[in-house]
Image (spheres, helix red, strand yellow):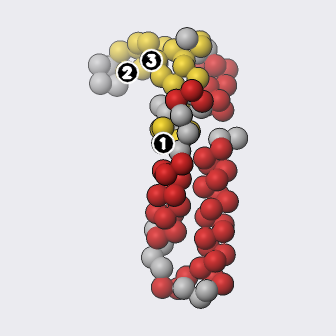
């Protein structure tokens, strides 16, 4: 699984537990904890790949090319991008993507 997503879940659980322990949870807005977690994740995982997942550096991404619908031009065309390992496997199986 994607490392940044695992860290996001762990951080959310830890911060939520701490807020409940310190009894400040009732004073927080619904988006406060997810926002804090996102800010922490952004400090360590600087690169956002085409699939939307975050990694520490671009070397962790897998470059793919596949045929897909390009909405802006309303045609089918080649799409190239860097994807995380999980999403790359999915695109290779489902869309016939090729590594480049």
Q: Nearer the viewer, mark 2 or mark 3?
A: 3
Disc 1/disc 2 C-alpha distance (Å): 27 Å
Q: What element carries label 2?
A: strand
Task: Tell me if label 1 and label 2 are in contact, CB under 8 Å.
Answer: no
Residue at point 46%, 68% (across, down): 31
Q: Is residue 87 above or below residue 11?
A: above
Does 63 sit above or below residue 48?
above
Q: Compute the Cα span from label 2 to label 3.
A: 8 Å
The residue under the point 48% across, 50% down is 42
- Residue 90 visible at all: no
Q: Residue 72 falls in which quadrant of the image?
A: top left
| Left or right for 87, reference 66 | right
- Within 10 Å of the Cα at label 3, are there few (<14), some (14-19), or many (20+) other Cα atoms? few
Residue at the spot of label 2: 70
Q: Position of residue 76 (x, y in %)?
A: 41, 14
Residue for point 59% across, 12% down: 98
In front: 91, or 4?
A: 4
Q: Distance between the residues labelled 1 and 3?
A: 23 Å
N-terminal label among 1 and 3: 1
The residue tagged 1 is 46
- Return the mark for residue 79: 3
Task: List x then y, in percent, for residue 59.
Answer: 57, 26
Quadrant position of the C terminus in the picture: top right
For discs 1 and 2, the disc positioned in front in the rendered view: 1
For mark 1, does the 10 Å Cα neighbourhood hold few (<14), some (14 to 19), or many (20 or more) residues?
Answer: few
Give the answer, above or below, for where 20 lies relative to 66: below
The quadrant the N terminus occupies is top right
């Amino acid at each position: 699984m994607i490392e940044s997503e695992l860290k996001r879940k762990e951080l959310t659980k830890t911060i939520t537990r701490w807020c409940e322990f310190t009894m400040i949870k009732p004073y927080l807005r619904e988006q406060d904890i997810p926002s804090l977690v996102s800010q922490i994740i952004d400090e360590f995982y600087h690169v956002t790949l085409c699939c939307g997942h975050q990694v520490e550096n671009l070397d962790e991404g897998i470059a793919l090319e596949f045929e897909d619908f390009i909405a802006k031009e309303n045609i089918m065309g080649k799409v190239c991008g860097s994807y995380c390992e999980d999403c790359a496997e999915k695109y290779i199986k489902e869309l016939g993507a090729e590594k480049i």
